[in-house]
Image (cartoon, rainbow, N blue to C red):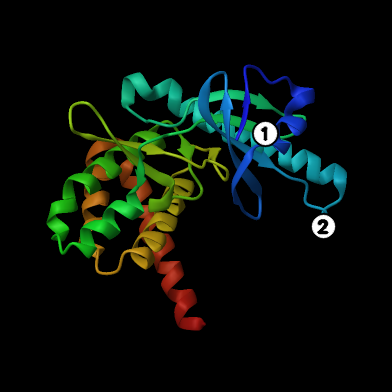
Amino acid sequence: MAEADSVSAPSVVSFLRDAELIKQGAEARVYRVRFLGRSAIVKERFRKRYRHHVLDEKLTRRRTAQEVRSILRCRKAVMSVGIAAPVVYFVDLSTNCIFLEEITDSITVREHIADAQAKGRSIESLHGLADKMGRILAKMHDEDVIHGDLTTSNMLLKPELSGDLKLLLIDFGLSFVSALPEDKGVDLYVLEKAFLSTHPNTETLFQKLLQSYTTASKKAPPVIKKLDEVRLRGRKRSMVG
């Protein structure tokens, strides 16, 4: 694992050569490092060689900036509305790298729900979690942040001293800022599809999440209307297919 007291833009690439690669996707590599004496995650967006290099550089830099903007928008709102997300330590737009707080001692919501189901716990025992998810997503959308990749793998649970579980949103790689109800409705639709495919027989749990979302957000009615419209379009496409 790489360790450093400071990292300047020109040294980011060499710094990552010794870093621990923990994940590689179609858009980015994710490393675990020590940064300023803290555990950190580095997300590096790499070049897409199938795209023209000028276009690729422009699009990649824009995605990096949008991701940071969304995280900072959530962080700025954390004291007033409670949207928890990792701290941004450092951003290098020349290499499209974001240094983020590593959320240690946490598990994904996906793991938590799967563990509860494996132990035979009732769906009702997870209603508190669904309520918390709905409230936080409502607050995120009220800040006009669209996550773009809502899944239970992109939500973390971290125990607090009070014994409660703090919910944090991560991986804002496809995020953007929009006040449009349709964008928010699509965000919820993506979560619903991912939720029900990952966690079978949890339809009532997702409905609980939506109830909480509707109660927590003053902007909810047009968003839920758009969600219903997107659902209908999805059903029509399935029937045609």
Q: Which numbered dot is residue 97? A: 1
Position in image of residue 12 (x %, y %): 73, 29
- Which is in the foreground here, disc 2 or disc 1? 1
Distance, label 2 to label 1, CA atoms, is 20 Å
Q: Quadrant of the N terminus?
A: top right
- In the picture provided, is 227 more to the left or to the right than 24? left
Quarter residue 100 falls in? top right
Q: Earlier in the sequence, mark 2 or mark 1?
A: 2
State yes or no: discs 2 and 1 in contact (Cβ < 8 Å): no
Image height of 230 relative to 24, above or below: below
Quarter residue 158 falls in? top left
- In the picture provided, is 63 more to the left or to the right than 215? right
Q: Residue at x 37, y 36 (%)?
A: 168
- In the picture provided, is 14 more to the left or to the right than 234? right
Q: Residue at x 73, y 19 (%)?
A: 8
Residue toward you, 97 or 60:
97
Q: Which residue is mark 2?
A: 50
Q: Residue at x 67, y 39 (%)?
A: 44
Q: Residue at x 27, y 50 (%)?
A: 210
Position in image of residue 129 (x %, y %): 23, 46
Q: Amino acid at mark 1?
A: Cys
